[in-house]
């Protein structure tokens, strides 16, 4: 078919989307698209769409879960845009738009109070929970969108409680400020995960373009909805709950689709406990499927990493017991129903992973049995449990670490929630 096309002397490709051939015939070089398809890059509608809304080099430049996550993220953004329209209409009605008895000053004061309380809420939430957003990005992402729906429901309900309108919208403003911090920060953490060529800025920019397109589509649909829901509270609430269900479902599917190859506490605990049970190493997709995506409260024996020394030991004898048989740059123990780990300044990422694994084992060993009475352990027995943990780690950790590397986990960095305390301690050989 191309017998007279000449001799192919070179080929080139643009990512995985296009490939071209250079052939020479009668001393002239000709460039042809591989497969006999003519045209240049970007002529097709699909090509233009990809170049506008997808990162350069897609799909090689992003993680394997990018497309599935972005699809569900687009669905949730669309439903949230429609819910937001209903909430905005209710807020404007509540401050007096369309009411001849309402004053501009009163509406302005209400709006300023809402914005002011939201700003304070943003600062306080970032102060208290900012360090948790990297390690628990999935949980906080889902929590942020749930809280956003709660805030919009409050705004829709506020006009029906005029005596409490200002209080309700201010509370909703605080919730939305939390959503802004948690949603933005966790989106940044997910962008770092998706970027495979250090192209975080490109991915973030294209994500913004996708969101803008979705909001534009939501705006067009809202122009149709607004005349239908005006002065019709039953339809307003019905549509809001429909959009909310779609929003929460899409968010759940979105965070479930993310497959992170770095360890946080939940993923490392899942992989480590599975290894202790049957010596099997879970791959990143397997562990991510088991990872909880809802915030958990009241763990039986929680774990705190990077604590002060006096939270682990409070006497020289306790320091000796904590150091006994332990050549690692960390100390750990159980105090006040919590496993606490303090770390030396020179500890490596490998040491952090080992300390977390041992803390997970110690947490399980210190948990009360599922049924029956549990007698609080004596101090000596507690340290004996710690020493058993050291022996277990000496025997099993190195094979475990090699196994997780072979399974595709990134052990060069972690998302473990370490605090900043670092300790130097001196002990006598025992």
Image (cartoon, rainbow, N blue to C red):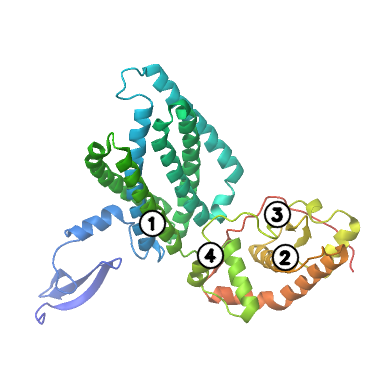
Query: Which residue is drawn at the image coordinates 45% and 29% (left, top)?
Result: 165
The answer to whether residue 31 of the structure is visible from this angle is yes
10 Å crowding of disc 2: few (<14), some (14-19), many (20+): some
Residue position marked by numbered label 1 in the rendering: 250
The kind of secondary structure element at disc 4 is loop
Q: Position of residue 331 (x, y in %)?
A: 77, 61
Q: Is residue 270 above or below residue 114?
A: below
Determine whether, in the image, residue 125 is placed left or right of residue 53: right
> Along the polypeptide, which appears first: circle 2 or circle 3?
3
* Cα distance in 3D space between marks 4 and 3: 23 Å
Q: Are the residues tagged 3 and 1 within 8 Å (C-beta)?
A: no
Q: Position of residue 336 (x, y in %)?
A: 78, 55
The kind of secondary structure element at disc 2 is loop
Residue position marked by numbered label 4 in the rendering: 291
The kind of secondary structure element at disc 3 is loop
Residue 268: quarter of image: bottom right
> Along the polypeptide, which appears first: circle 2 or circle 4?
4
Q: Nearer the viewer, mark 2 or mark 4?
A: 2
Residue position marked by numbered label 3 in the rendering: 306
Considering the image in quadrants, where does the C terminus appear?
A: bottom right
Query: Which residue is drawn at the image coordinates 58% and 77% (left, top)?
Result: 403
């Amino acid at each position: 078919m191309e017998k007279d096309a000449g001799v192919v002397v070179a080929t080139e490709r643009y990512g995985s989307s296009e490939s071209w051939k250079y052939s020479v015939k009668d001393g002239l070089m000709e460039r042809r698209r591989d497969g006999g398809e003519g045209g240049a890059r970007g002529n097709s509608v699909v090509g233009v769409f990809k170049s506008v809304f997808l990162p350069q080099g897609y799909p090689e430049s992003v993680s394997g879960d990018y497309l599935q996550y972005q699809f569900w993220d687009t669905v949730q953004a669309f439903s949230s845009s429609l819910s937001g329209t209903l909430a905005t209409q209710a807020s404007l009605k509540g401050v007096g738009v369309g009411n001849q008895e309402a004053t501009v000053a009163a509406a302005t004061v209400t709006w300023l109070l809402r914005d002011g309380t939201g700003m304070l809420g943003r600062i306080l939430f970032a102060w208290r929970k900012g360090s948790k957003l990297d390690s628990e990005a999935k949980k906080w992402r889902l929590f942020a969108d749930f809280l956003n729906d709660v805030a919009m429901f409050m705004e829709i309900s506020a006009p029906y409680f005029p005596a409490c309108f200002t209080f309700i919208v201010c509370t909703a403003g605080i919730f939305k400020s939390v959503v802004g911090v948690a949603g933005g920060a966790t989106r940044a953490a997910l962008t770092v995960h998706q970027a495979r060529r250090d192209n975080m800025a490109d991915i973030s920019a294209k994500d913004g373009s996708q969101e803008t397109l979705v909001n534009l589509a939501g705006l067009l649909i809202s122009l149709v909805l607004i005349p239908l829901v005006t002065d019709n509270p039953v339809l307003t609430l019905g549509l809001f709950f429909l959009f909310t269900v779609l929003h929460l479902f899409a968010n759940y599917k979105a965070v479930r689709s993310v497959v992170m190859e770095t360890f946080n506490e939940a993923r490392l605990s899942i992989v480590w406990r599975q290894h202790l049970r049957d010596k099997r190493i879970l791959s990143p997709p397997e562990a991510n499927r088991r990872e909880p995506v809802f915030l958990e409260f009241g763990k039986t024996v929680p774990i705190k990493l990077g604590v002060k020394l006096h939270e682990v030991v409070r006497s020289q004898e306790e320091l000796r017991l904590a150091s006994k048989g332990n050549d690692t740059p960390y100390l750990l123990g159980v105090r006040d129903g919590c496993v606490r780990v303090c770390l030396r300044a020179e500890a490596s990422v490998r040491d952090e992973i080992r300390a977390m694994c041992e803390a997970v084992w110690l947490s399980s060993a210190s948990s009360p049995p599922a049924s029956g009475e549990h007698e609080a352990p004596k101090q000596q027995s507690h340290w004996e449990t710690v020493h058993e943990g050291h022996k277990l780690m000496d025997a099993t950790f190195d094979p475990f670490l090699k196994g997780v590397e072979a399974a595709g986990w990134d052990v060069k960095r972690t998302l473990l929630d370490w605090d900043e305390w670092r300790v130097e301690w001196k002990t006598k050989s025992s």
